[in-house]
Amino acid sequence: MLFRSQEHHKDYAVELAEQGYVALAMCWFGCGGGRNTYGDIELGDIQAAVDYLKSLETVDGNQRGVVGFSRGSSLGLAAAGEMSDFTAVVDYYGASVISDSFTKIIQASPTGRNYEIQNLNGAVLILHGDGDETVKVGAAYSLEKQLQKYGKPYEMKIYPGVGHAFNWVDGRGEYNSQAASDAWNRTLAFFDKHLR
């Protein structure tokens, strides 16, 4: 599953499919007709998407991953903390679980429960630039500390001098071809490790 699926993110879904994965791209923020605030998030929609994927004969019922970009990373972490369905979470330059923006996700929970790192059942890959002015790199380090605290498996790559949305080729982010390529290769290797 991919969150915050702008047009170029759909290319990632296609590439995942070409790698043998079943991919579903969900758009939540700023996608024309999509939701634009955290309060609009319905984790029930995510559960419905997971249930749909589980119903497909080509999907292994025990191996699911989620990739999130920016605010979609927070949503991916929230979903993984709420549901036991994800064995791999990839966090591209997202807000950490202890940030103000994540608190808004917590308030949108249909169950009223907080999304705690200790509830994660899968590994996390954190990809962030230390030049990110939108979501400061401290968010990545905060998430790392929480993962360490609860003994959760994770990998992290911080890209020196790289800004926010470093893989957005549409000009709205701070595109960096080297970081984008490395991050995607890491994403594929991470999924190969945890989903195959």
Image (cartoon, rainbow, N blue to C red):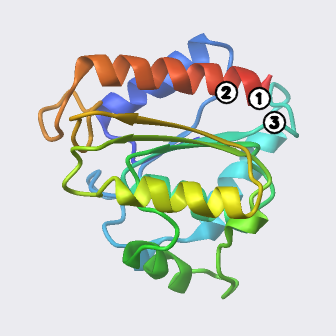
Q: Say the numbered circle drawn on residue 195.
A: 1
Q: Name which residue type carries label 3.
A: Gln
Q: Secondary structure at mark 2?
A: helix
Looking at the picture, tell me which residue is in the foreground, 92 or 79.
92
Is the Cβ of the residue at disc 3 closer than 8 Å to that at disc 1? yes
Looking at the picture, tell me which residue is in the foreground, 58 or 126.
126
Q: CA distance from mark 3 to mark 1?
A: 5 Å
- Judge left or right: residue 65 versus residue 94: right
Residue at (39%, 78%) from the top-left corner? Answer: 100
Q: Earlier in the sequence, mark 3 or mark 1?
A: 3
Q: Which residue is mark 3?
A: 63
Q: Secondary structure at mark 3?
A: loop
Place of residue 28 in the rendered image (x, y in percent of width and height, measured from the top left) = 41, 57
Q: Quadrant of the N terminus?
A: top right
Q: Which residue is mark 2?
A: 191
Q: Name which residue type carries label 2.
A: Phe
Q: Is residue 172 above or below residue 106?
A: above
Q: Earlier in the sequence, mark 3 or mark 2?
A: 3
User: Is residue 80 among what the camera can see?
Assistant: no
Place of residue 94 in the rendered image (x, y in percent of width and height, measured from the top left) = 41, 54
Q: Specify few, some or many for label 1: CA neighbours under 10 Å numbering under 14, 14-19, or 20 or more.
A: some
Is the Cβ of the residue at disc 1 closer than 8 Å to that at disc 2? yes
Q: Secondary structure at mark 1?
A: helix
Dividing the picture into quarters, in which one does residue 176 lie? top left
Residue at (34%, 72%) from the top-left corner? Answer: 37
| In front: label 3 or label 2 | 2
Q: Quadrant of the C terminus?
A: top right
User: Is residue 8 among what the camera can see?
Assistant: yes
Dividing the picture into quarters, in which one does residue 42 lie? bottom right
Q: CA distance from mark 3 to mark 2?
A: 10 Å
Q: Is residue 132 above or below residue 136?
A: above
